Image (cartoon, coloured by chain):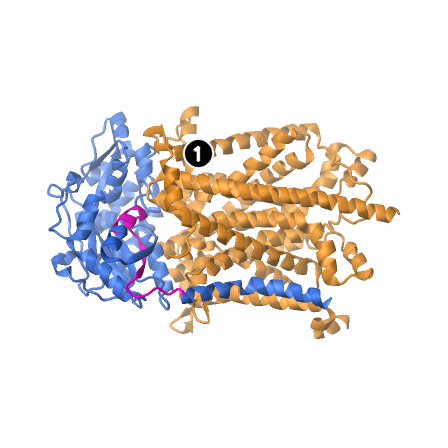
Chain colours: A orange, B blue
Amino acid sequence: MHGTMKRKSLSKTDPALFFALVTVWLSFAVFIFLPLIRLLLTTFIVDGALSFTNMKKVLGTGYNIRALYGSLILATAVSLSGTFLGYLFALAVTRTNLPKILKTLLGAVTILPLISPPFTSSISLTLALGPNGMLLKAFGIGDFSIYGFLGTWISETLTYFPVAFMVITAILNTMSATLDDAALCLGASRWRMFRTITIPLSLPGIGNSVLLLFGASLADFATPLILGGHTFPVLPTEAYLLITGMFDLRGGATLSFLLLVPALLVFFLQRMLLGNKSFVSVTGKNGARTEFARLPSALTAFIAVICSFLVVFILYLYAIILWGSFVKVWSVNNSFTLDHYLYVFKHGQKAISDTLLIAILSTVIGSVLAVVIGYVAQRKQFIGKRFFEFSSMLNYALPGTVVGIAYIIAFNQRPILLTGTLSILVAAYVFRYYATGIRSVIASLEQIDPALEEASLSLGASSIRTFTHVTIPLIIPAVLAGMRYLFIHCMTAISATIFLVSVRWTLLTTRILESMTELQFSQASAFSMVLIVIVFIADAIMLYLMKLSTSKFHKSQEISYEKVGA
Amino acid sequence: MNKMQKVLTLLLLVALCMAPVFAAGVEEAKPKVGGTLNVYSIMPEKYATKIFEEFTKETGIKVNFVRLSSGEALARIIAEKANPQVDALWGGPADTYEAGVLEGVFDVYVPSEAAKVPTQFKSAKGYWTGIGVIPLTFMSNAKYLKEKGLNPPTSWNDLLDPAYKNSLQMADARTSGTATERIYSLVKVMGEDEAFAYQKKLHQNIQLYTKGGAGGAMPVATGQAASGVFYIVDALDIQQQGYDLVISYPKEGVTYGVEASGIIKGAKNLEAAKALMDWASTKRLGEVMVANLINYIPTRPDVTVTNPALDMSKVKLLEAEVAWKGENRTRLVERWIAEVIQQ
């Protein structure tokens, strides 16, 4: 009965929700469903009639089936190894007594693979571990082939574990330390505390991280393109090859639709695993805030060893790029020169300013949408909620190549004429990469007891005021984490937008790939370094904001305690 | 409460409406006919920049361009068919143009001096005109050859030598015109079935099939790979950067690619596009290429080429008609995937 009432008059009972829903659904319709439907039509309508010939043709070859398995195996491996490493790094930063300077270094170094386009690190990885690679020579290893599963796996793990690190750190930071204290006071060992408190409470973060990494790996075409070789085909790369190489848009689109199945599966699996459990630890009823308890020392040592090894390896890979940007001719004439940077600032200026503008616009718009969508999906009840949440993630689950092609097909004719504009690039980025923002908002909300919001409501605040004054301050660290990721992606991603850059709007990443294909390794390195420095600075600013907001959040908790105490 | 709702709704609407606002700006910014030209260039950026600079200097027409690989360029032109974003396609293999002709994305235009371009370097129906010719060549790392005591390969069969095991890099036929050119060459040299039997054997020595035609050039230059098959323009380019490389030709012969240019159907700056095609058909283009070390062999026989590496008098060049390439490309690539890659 209550349900029917609600259904009949949502616009009256909760007008804010109603307006939010209408607006978001409208944006989904234009920027997610329209391109997808147009692409579906391209795939399944042959000469005006429904036809499965494209599907049959694609599924008919054993190589494509192998590519499907390859994609699944790779995505599983990357999501597990990446989450594992990300968790270790997150623990190192939040739960150990390692020196502060070391923690800052860890955070700074993890960001490197994230802020450079994936193919850049793939190439320095090839130079280090490829045939005749510098590291292989140094260690005297002769017969090691990086091309295939192994190289792709290593490269993608290195590229994506920082995502896991970011998501899990945010979760570890918002846990309540009093639980640790309680466990230790009650006589539990540090191992037991870790096993029964830290791990279970970080499950939403781990789940998110696995989902995000699985999706990212599933959609990544650049890394397998460079490192997969012919022995290890994966679907997005095969789709890309079909579209750009064989001019077979239908075949490529059809292949990509196969990716939707595993993407859907992971999504529902995660819902099932985490949907019904309560992870509330921020209740507003806490006692005084204390420091998180430290991990057992054996575990700390293990974490320190793994993290240092990885940090050294990453620094080594990037040193190769840095070196490459300053030498006259790569590995032949190693004398110092600034020519490549002069070239970048002379001929790459437009690309730099375009990229920055696009990234900033996308980050702002994407974050607003992510907060609204995440909040509505986690806190509110309405019809079609699951579908709502799933729709929001759709562009992220699809390979970028397909999104790019779908956008061209959908937005190249009236009424929505967008090709060649700034807005098509912004829209592609927003609806593809706000996913991390949504996930981290949801994960963060899962830890915050709705009683806090109910209290605000019962004290007479409106739902909007509650949202802006209670919910937002509580989830700000998660929002900023999402923003960081969004901005970074807008600066570095290439798969979707390589189809969307135009004579008017160009991107740094396309220029780097360009330099690579034109064999200007040093120029590509210089472009990469410029990109890395820009993103690094922007990232430092956001990190600072995050820290600022987290301490504010701590203070607000203390205030609530005082009030309760009074 | 109402006020706050409005603020929130407004915020969302602003986010949503951002897109059309920007789109509107573009509508107004349509360039004047004759003033500006928008181009997709398959020719590498560093070459296209120099050539277009010269074109602008001589005609006053400003050129905006994006560089794309041939597959990406064609995919985009087809996708943008209803509302073309560019006026012309510049560079890239002629068989890409033939594929585009089948999709109906090119316009017929015969440039003013096209008559002086030999027939095998232009479309019979006038859809595209050749601007440069590039034969295939072998390029090897001099140090690698020396260490293994090998001579530079001078026959296709030399590449089957077990000394090259796991050390050849060449392009993937699915993405690269260089790779399909290699298959055309082999088919012309030994016949189709023999060519595939040969490639199956060659596969044993392949370290990696690269996405782009020039993708293997840097690995060969730095010694990561020993040797590969490239277009002469890519091979000379990396050699001129200072790497110790040996360029050699197979005695059985090689086919060559024709770099083309053409006008997109529905071009918004048609006159400017025609001006570019006219200019490209004159001797000027060839002279600009020679002066800037852009290593295409000009399609105009009356341009004097100074680089001895582009002297084709001692190289056995095989004829492979563009129409034949266009008709057989998909079939040959599919056979390559089925028999060579998946064996």
Q: Position of residue B163 (x, y in %)?
A: 27, 31
- State which quadrant residue B232 falls in: top left
Farthest residue to the right: give it.
Answer: A566
Q: Nearer the viewer, residue A343 or A4?
A: A343
Whether residue B124 sits left or right of residue B169 in the image: it is left
Residue B64 colored magenta?
no
Residue A430: x percent and y percent?
53, 56
The residue to which callout 1 is attached is A322
Residue pictured at 60% horizontal, 41% vertical: A165
Residue at image position (60%, 46%) is: A209
Q: Is residue B31 magenta?
A: yes
Figure quadrant of the N terminus of chain B:
bottom right
Q: For residue A327, what is the image quadrant?
A: top left
In this rendering, the answer to whether A354 lies above or below A164 is below
- From this view, report whether residue A506 is shown above or below residue A192: below
Residue drawn 46% across the image and 39% down it: A150
Q: Residue at x 56, y 45 (%)?
A: A79
Residue B123 in which image quadrant: bottom left
B330 with respect to A133 (left or right): left
Amino acid identity at mark 1: Leu
| Front one among A274 and A398 | A398
> Numbered disc 1: what chain?
A
Disc 1 on helix, strand or loop? Answer: helix
Report x, y in % for residue A76. Answer: 54, 46
Q: Residue A497 vs residue B215: left or right? A: right
Start-end of magenta stretch:
B29-51
